[in-house]
Amino acid sequence: MPSVTVCPFPDLQSVALEHPAVIASDWELNGEERPGAMLKGWDYGTDVTASRRIKLDVPAARIASGLSANSTLRVAVLWSTGAGFEVRELGFSSRVQLSGDDPRVVEVSLVIPGERLASTFALTTEIVLEARGTRSGQSSAIEIGSRLWSDDVTIALEGSGPRLPVVLVELDPPDSAWSLRSTAEWLYSHPSAAIHVLVNRRREDICRALLSRPPDEKDRLVRSALKFDIGRQMIERALDDQDFDDDAAFGPQTSGEAIRQRLRIVFPGLSIEEVRAFRLTERERYERQLQASHQLFVTAQ
Amino acid sequence: MTLFTYPRLEIDKAAELINATAGLQVEKIARTADKQGFQAGVPPVLGHTFVTEERLASIRAQLRQLAGSSGYPHGSKLRDRQNFDTRAAIYLHGGLDAVPGELLRDEVWQYFTCVIAPDIVCWRWRQDDREPNIDRFMGGVRNCFGRLWRRADVFRDDRLSDPWTLVSSLLEDNFTAILERPRIARNRALAREVARTFLLRRELAKKLDSSNPTQEFLRQFMLRLVRHGGYVALPVLQHDEMSTAISEMANATLSAMGVRVPSNEQLIDDAPQLAIAPGWKPNATAGDVGEPAGRGARSGLVWNKVTELLRSRRRT
């Protein structure tokens, strides 16, 4: 699905038209259509061939964007990968004129070297302004590279682990219970790659509560406390991070996007900036709302 | 050339090995690592050729040699440690013969810090209290060796007559400011141009009234870039377009801070080592054959024929 961003100019989805300005087919990966969220059989020796068709309804694109017929757009695809460090490269790029009434069809095709992939990869398709024509609408995009349409998809190459890996380690001080470890790029990474819950193995009571099957009432209380505290710590870290805002371009299945969606549920109707202000000015209510949304100590099965 | 896969170290095993360095002298940590060999990691599920123990031993020896010329295993000055960083970055970038995807994994770098050279991590980063600096062992942008490899991978710039100019010119704080911004750092072409643009203006920024004027300029420049990235896709721009857009943002940042910026030509004259080498051309990108702006429209049918022709050429 196309991502929703707040733009200072009309993009190709600004106006609800009878016919959408952009119709993008699903990706075809190594000859397989709609391969789902995982590419089976990949190894370092297997390059990934990705292709899709982007159809641009030119009149609709002009109406939606406010750009004139002598404007030019660029269709580009970036691929990214990483399981810690992330790299992102331009894999395909092609110009499209906005003149005439015939639809433009761009056959996107790129080959990603298998040796350069790790764990997952993402494909981001962007349609941006290449050149703004004369007589374009006053509010239309001006800057080269202005994003007019975008979508992305993430493909797993090696399967996925638990969403938040829990690891038993020795923590200090010895009576501490657990802590959350996140990488510097955690907001832009899948949670399983960027966040670890470290549980103090010296605390046998806590380890037992987390490992017991089935859990008793005390175990459920411990689990509830863990779930609340980890959820709260993740929200706090995100709010303390200046990169975390409503416009940040977090990809799907990233921690940043997950927390952003979570905040919309916990604090409905508030922008992230407003949540920050709420935390600052009404701390007690903020904390109570977090407790309620995480169902702290609600242990009914 | 044979490319190798490397062992990976899971986080719980890494934590165990980090704890084992607590309170020990660097020489003792080195002896323990030598005694334990290279058994602790797990091989990747997906393979090329798995790296041999001889090669791992050679990497350990090479890193110790580089560190040795900067004061290892004894205390060292900041300048010595920075020299080690630059030389180790260049070595890690070219000396591992690793499958490129391997070096994007936290677990591989955890193996480097916890098994191959924990003594160097402690020499480079440990504080006086001898407590291990966990961030420098664990995967991520602060890993002792991963950050150096990343530094070389991102900032080795083939456009310049000396490709290592950016790596040897940026300061520690400069690397951090760029590399800990994943939206910038993950796009190498973008990050390199940001670094080159900053270095071209670093002397100008020294005029700012600030305790750390160049870093303040870089911080404001990065903030402007990140804000801009919300609606402008800089990484998809052609090389010259991207360069112009980034220069304009840097100039706007300096202007807003009250510094007058001379022309680009003047900036290059003042720092010729940052000039793009004559004859350098960007790599072609698949599909990048579209008609130049301003020409008449092609019909969808003609467009399809062009792209199909190109696809068939690629197949052959």
Image: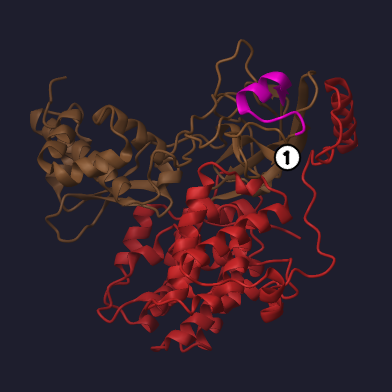
Chain colours: A brown, B red
Compared across the picture, whether A99 is left or right of A83 comes to: right
Image position of B140 with respect to A33: above or below: below
The stretch in magenta equals: A53-70
Chain letter for the residue marked with disc 1 in the picture: A
Compared across the picture, whether B151 is left or right of A203 comes to: right
Quarter holding the C terminus of chain A is top left
Quarter holding the N terminus of chain A is top right
Residue under pointer 1: A92
- List x then y, in percent, for residue B189: 65, 56
- List x then y, in percent, for residue A147: 59, 37
Residue found 42% across the figure and 78% down from its top = B124
Residue found 23% across the figure and 57% down from its top = A170
In-front residue for pair A243/B203: B203
Compared across the picture, whether B289 is left or right of A66 comes to: right
* Quadrant of residue B306 within the rendered picture: top right
- List x then y, in percent, for residue A130: 71, 41
* Quadrant of residue B301 within the rendered picture: top right
**Secondary structure type for disc 1:** strand
Q: Is residue B4 visible?
A: no
In-front residue for pair A93/A215: A93
* Quadrant of residue A210 within the rendered picture: top left
Q: Is residue B11 magenta?
A: no
Residue at the outermost top position = A18
Image position of A13 with respect to A287: above or below: above
Query: How dense is the environment of label 1, judged by Cα within 10 Å: few (below 14), some, or many (20 and up)?
Result: many
